[in-house]
Amino acid sequence: MPELPEVEIVKQSLNKKIKGKIIQKVSVKNRNLRFKLDKNFEKKIKNKKIVQINRFSKYIILKFDDNSGFIIHLGMSGTIHLMNKNIKNIFTNSSFYHSPNLPKKHNHIVIEFEKKKLIYNDPRRFGYFLIFKNKEELKKRFIHFGPEPFSNNFNSNYIYDYFKNKKKNIKNFLIDQRFVSGIGNIYASEILFFCKINPSKKVKYLSFNDCKKIFYFSKLVLKKAIEKGGSSIRDFKNISGNQGKFQKNFKVYQRENLNCLKSGCKGVIKKKIISNRSSFFCNICQK
Ligand SMILES: [Zn+2]
């Protein structure tokens, strides 16, 4: 499942390839995504010019010049492929996960520009496209979301105040989008490793200093992951022929039973299911 860094890579690819382009044709092969596609989706986006492509959390936001636009959420298995209409490109995937080339099946939405085609592929159909009419509607969509790790509203004081008297464990909060937007299962484990905090620790027992670490390493881990092009779980390449390399930097994620990578630590990485999701942590240095 793509997390913030992977979605950021998709956004960057789209920015390079389709910003400023006018949508000439839209064809929908399957409207039954996680939320049923707006019945006038084709009409609403046709002939519109894409003037801005942003990202909030794990959502890509495409804006037209009249302030309307649409949001894309990739769900569990959604990928966006960009193809040239005239010259065949080797790699079409705008990110680094799943197939680098367009699969034959599960291509649900095709958006055509003068020279390019954007194709949305999603075998499990947990992703979706959502139209918004104006700025207000867009803002409303994200009203219940907490700040992104990179926002000024996400800071040590915010974290410390938020955790006061709360009974759940830290892992729970890191992947709770109401607390912070964009962190998922992979990066939550990585962040807690750097903080030396056990994922099962109840947040009400965290000190202000712990909160400072959570603030600092949330930003750092995500920033590093974006710089490395996100994480490819397999060695796939994207549209530019590059690979996501962050998976080579994983300290704990999917390293069960391997030695802890913190220098001097004799610990072993353990896997534990917390709130139905696997958490990876060192049994010695994460307390
Ligand atoms: Zn350790």
Image: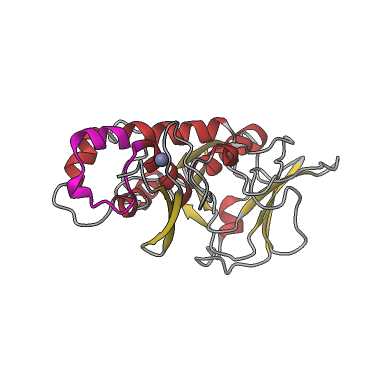
Q: Residue furthest left?
A: 165
Q: How is the image coloured?
A: secondary structure
Q: x and y percent of residue 204 in the render?
A: 17, 49
| Position of residue 39 in the picture relative to residue 206 (left or right) | right
Q: x and y percent of residue 269 in the render?
A: 46, 49
Asked whether residue 202 is drawn in magenta, I would say yes
* Depth order, front residue of 285/88: 285
* Depth order, front residue of 143/281: 281
| Position of residue 248 in the picture relative to residue 113 (left or right) | left
In the image, is residue 161 above or below residue 277? above
Q: For the point 37% across and 39% down, which residue is it?
A: 148
Q: Quadrant of the N terminus?
A: bottom right
* Depth order, front residue of 255/242: 255
Let me know if residue 113 appears in the view.
Answer: yes
Q: How many marks?
A: 0
Q: x and y percent of residue 235 in the render?
A: 70, 45
Q: Residue furthest right?
A: 87
Q: Quadrant of the C terminus?
A: top left
Asked whether residue 287 is drawn in magenta, I would say no
Q: For the point 47% across and 31% down, which residue is it?
A: 223
> Over which residues does the magenta segment extend?
195-214
The quarter of the image that holds ligand 1 is: top left
* Depth order, front residue of 190/69: 190
Q: For the point 53% across and 57% down, which residue is it?
A: 75
Find residue 91 and report its image quarter: top right
Q: Residue furthest bottom?
A: 32
